[in-house]
Image: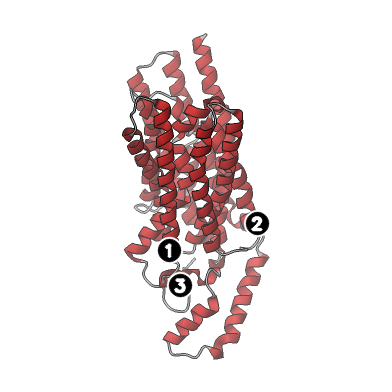
């Protein structure tokens, strides 16, 4: 479908707006990426409850429910308000989280329950961020969508870099003390980055570029925008009020008439592909991936595996701008990566069962992670880019939110499958020991 904007030709986004969308991408996934990048901290204090599996489950339990509510009916609040709630809530949750973990003894059940509760809340406010940013971005040209998706990949890399720096700065000889100080500083920095995202969002809303593309999304007062544009053309707005009000009413009525079921009928292929994409990813990552050997990386092993994943995930999100991908490409890439479930488990099996050369098994692990991450990045951007083209312009926001919901649904189902894949490799380990 052709891109339709307000009655004045849309202004150029420019490099500054591209940077804004990259920052939006960073902020949209920063909450979970922060937890994932410092998963060793939680493993150290709550290893009895295996945070690599339980935390993803907690994070997306309420997230999936709330995202469904956000797209079930017409948009109740503006994307701006939705995102402000999500970002501020994420900042508070991330700052509190390490303090709660540190307050209780290791493997404390009460501490784990409270920590899980905070992660549940973080998942809830992340629903605002994810649904809001996906919906917001869908109103803009493909170039901005790619910038946003690339920013999501950069989000993980940025958290990994900060984690490396924090780990290297604290080497007192007391592992517990290092973990405590490192976690407090790391999550404080994460909150600060989200604060930058919030200020960037508020500044972006003041630009003519945002006003032009979001007038139809009712994030701005549509009548005021059109009056301003008419003034530029030296046309009196009073004579056009009736027509403007009529147009606004028709758009509102149209949005109310589209149910979630009807939206799904328009997007079911993309939605289901998006869901399956993340089922495979989270069935294997992080739990199965970080359970395998990686050369002699020691305490850096987990964060290194996660960093490799994030780097190539970002590469996959960006590479879509260099090639022309279609819906058929999405089917091939997303369904074809199912083989990785087998290759990840077989690599672990051969390593444990036959004492494979650790360097060789590490190489195979890296190849698996690269393939998993790259195809995940390509699939994510591809689904987000295709969905808005399959609906009318006024439904682009809901199309983006729909993809966001099915991403989260896939992640949630993937975390459930992760219990099974982790059980399989645990059984392999026990079998070999016997």
Residue 377 position, x and y percent, is 43, 45
Q: Is residue 203 in view from this perspective?
A: yes
Mark 1–mark 3 Cα distance, whole angstroms, equals: 12 Å
* Relative to 323, residue 5 above or below: below
Foreground label between 1 and 3: 3
Colouring chosen for the image of the structure? secondary structure
- In terms of depth relative to the viewer, which is nearer, 302 or 411? 302
Mark 3–mark 2 Cα distance, whole angstroms, equals: 26 Å
Residue 157 position, x and y percent, is 37, 43
- Tell me whether the residue at label 2 lies in contact with that at label 1, contact meaning CB atoms closer than 8 angstroms: no
Q: Is residue 241 left or right of residue 432?
A: right
Q: Is residue 387 in view from this perspective?
A: no
Residue at point 61% right, 42% down? 61
Foreground label between 2 and 1: 2
The dot on residue 72 is 2
* Relative to 60, residue 229 above or below: below
Where is mark 3, residue-wise? 212
Residue at point 34% right, 63% down? 16
Mark count: 3
- In terms of depth relative to the viewer, which is nearer, 113 or 65? 113
First in sequence: mark 1 vs mark 3: 1
First in sequence: mark 2 vs mark 1: 2
Where is mark 1, residue-wise? 141
Residue 91 position, x and y percent, is 49, 50
Badge 1 marks a residue whose secondary structure is: loop
Residue 285 position, x and y percent, is 48, 34
């Amino acid at each position: 479908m052709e891109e339709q904007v307000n009655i004045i030709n849309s202004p150029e986004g420019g490099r500054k707006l591209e940077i804004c969308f990259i920052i939006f991408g960073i902020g949209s996934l920063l909450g979970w990426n922060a937890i994932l990048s410092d998963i060793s901290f939680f493993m150290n204090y709550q290893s009895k409850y295996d945070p690599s599996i339980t935390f993803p489950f907690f994070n997306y339990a309420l997230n999936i429910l709330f995202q469904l509510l956000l797209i079930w009916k017409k948009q109740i609040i503006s994307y701006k308000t939705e995102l402000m709630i999500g970002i501020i809530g994420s900042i508070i949750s991330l700052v509190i989280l390490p303090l709660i973990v540190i307050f209780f003894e290791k493997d404390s059940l009460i501490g784990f329950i409270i920590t899980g509760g905070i992660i549940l809340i973080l998942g809830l406010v992340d629903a605002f961020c994810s649904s809001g940013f996906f919906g917001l971005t869908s109103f803009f040209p493909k170039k901005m969508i790619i910038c946003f998706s690339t920013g999501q990949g950069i989000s993980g890399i940025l958290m990994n870099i900060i984690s490396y720096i924090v780990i290297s700065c604290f080497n007192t000889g007391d592992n517990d003390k290092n973990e405590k100080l490192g976690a407090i500083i790391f999550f404080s920095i994460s909150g600060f980055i989200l604060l930058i995202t919030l200020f960037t969002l508020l500044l972006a809303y003041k630009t003519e570029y945002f006003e032009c593309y979001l007038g139809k999304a009712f994030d701005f007062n549509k009548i005021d925008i059109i009056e301003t544009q008419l003034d530029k053309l030296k046309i009196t707005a009073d004579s056009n009020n009736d027509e403007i009000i009529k147009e606004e009413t028709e758009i509102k009525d149209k949005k109310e008439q589209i149910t979630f079921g009807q939206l799904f009928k328009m997007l079911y292929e993309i939605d289901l592909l998006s869901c399956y994409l993340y089922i495979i990813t989270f069935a294997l990552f992080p739990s199965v991936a970080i359970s395998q050997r990686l050369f002699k990386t020691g305490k850096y092993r987990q964060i290194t595996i996660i960093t490799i994943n994030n780097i190539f995930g970002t590469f996959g999100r960006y590479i879509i701008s260099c090639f022309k991908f279609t819906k058929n490409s999405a089917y091939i890439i997303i369904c074809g990566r199912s083989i990785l479930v087998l290759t990840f488990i077989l690599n672990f099996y051969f390593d444990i069962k036959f004492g494979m050369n650790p360097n060789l098994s590490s190489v195979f692990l890296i190849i698996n992670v690269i393939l998993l991450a790259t195809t995940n990045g390509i699939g994510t951007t591809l689904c987000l880019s295709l969905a808005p083209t399959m609906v009318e312009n006024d439904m682009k926001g809901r199309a983006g939110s729909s993809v966001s919901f099915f991403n989260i649904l896939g992640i949630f189902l993937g975390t459930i499958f992760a219990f099974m894949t982790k059980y399989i490799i645990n059984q392999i380990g026990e079998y070999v020991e016997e």
